[in-house]
Image (cartoon, grey):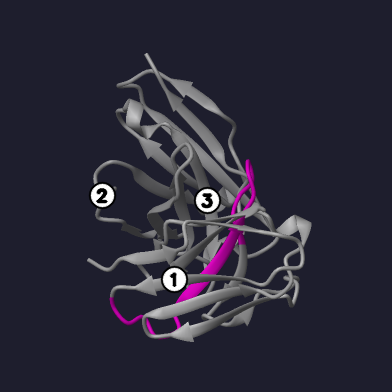
Amino acid sequence: DIQMTQSPSSVAASVGDRVTITCRASQAISSWLAWYQQKPGKAPKLLIYAASTLQSGVPSRFSGSGSGTDFTLTISSLQPEDFATYFCQRAHSFPLFGGGTKVEIK
Amino acid sequence: VQLVQSGAEVKKPGESLKISCQVSGYSFSNYWIGWVRQMPGKGLEWLGIIYPGDSDTRYSPSFQGQVTISADKSINTAYLQWSSLKASDTAMYYCARRTTAMAFDYWGQGSQVTVSS
């Protein structure tokens, strides 16, 4: 079975920091990857699809890259509203989510 | 685009339940609607998905036979149901619209299901 592994599981950062989150698929998935942000008590929000395409309305400090098995989500300059949990998802007819990365205040 | 889910439910083990997701702002028949579970303090798990246009339904192997997904085009509503709840079904359940890029772009607010004796 395919697995989606995110790392780190949590990261402590300060406002203004550059933050990078990694997602690894156990089998190649081309560019079929999406990233979501979830804040406590809220539904997930789509940030990026097709590995690197920014969803409409999402700030340009978010970017995604990668293809095949290794993907990254980068926040270029962390803002107070970015402290949240981030999930990757194999964008497939049978979707699969990564375990999540919690971005916490340092 | 809006997906509005039914409210919180508290049920006993063995009881049945059907929760709903009513959509507006787009053509309900033309987009797949998926259901996602989030257990307390945990990550996201995909349960299954339905295409309301023809009711084509797919289930995660982990949830096949455990839940039933359906849709009613006449009222733009998708459903997730259980015939016999277990305590382990306690979770937040989200519906979400799937795009052609296979990502979920619009989400409901979530329906909290609590199963306790």
Q: Secondary structure at mark 3?
A: strand
Which residue lies under the disc numbered 2? B64
According to the picture, the residue beneath numbered tag 1 turns out to be: A23
Crowd around label 2: few <14 · some 14–19 · many ≥20 (10 Å): few
| Chain assignment, label 2 | B
Between A47 and B33, the residue placed more toward the observer is A47
Which range of residues does the magenta coloring cover?
Answer: A27-45
Query: Which residue is pictured at 41% across the width and 58% down the height?
Result: B49
Query: The disc labelled 2 sits on which kind of residue?
Result: Gln
Of badges 3 and 1, the one in the foreground is 1
Residue at the spot x=60%, y=47% of the render? B22
Tell me residue A79's x, y (percent): 77, 62
How many neighbours does mark 1 have within 10 angstroms: few (below 14), some (14-19), or many (20 or more)? many
Task: Give amino acid for label 1.
Answer: Cys
Q: Disc 3 designates what residue?
A: B95
In the figure, B57 relative to A17: above or below?
Answer: above
State which quarter of the image contains the N terminus of chain A.
bottom left
Circle 3 chain: B
Task: Give x and y (percent) for residue A13.
Answer: 66, 60
Residue at horizontal 38 percent and vertical 73 percent from the top: A24
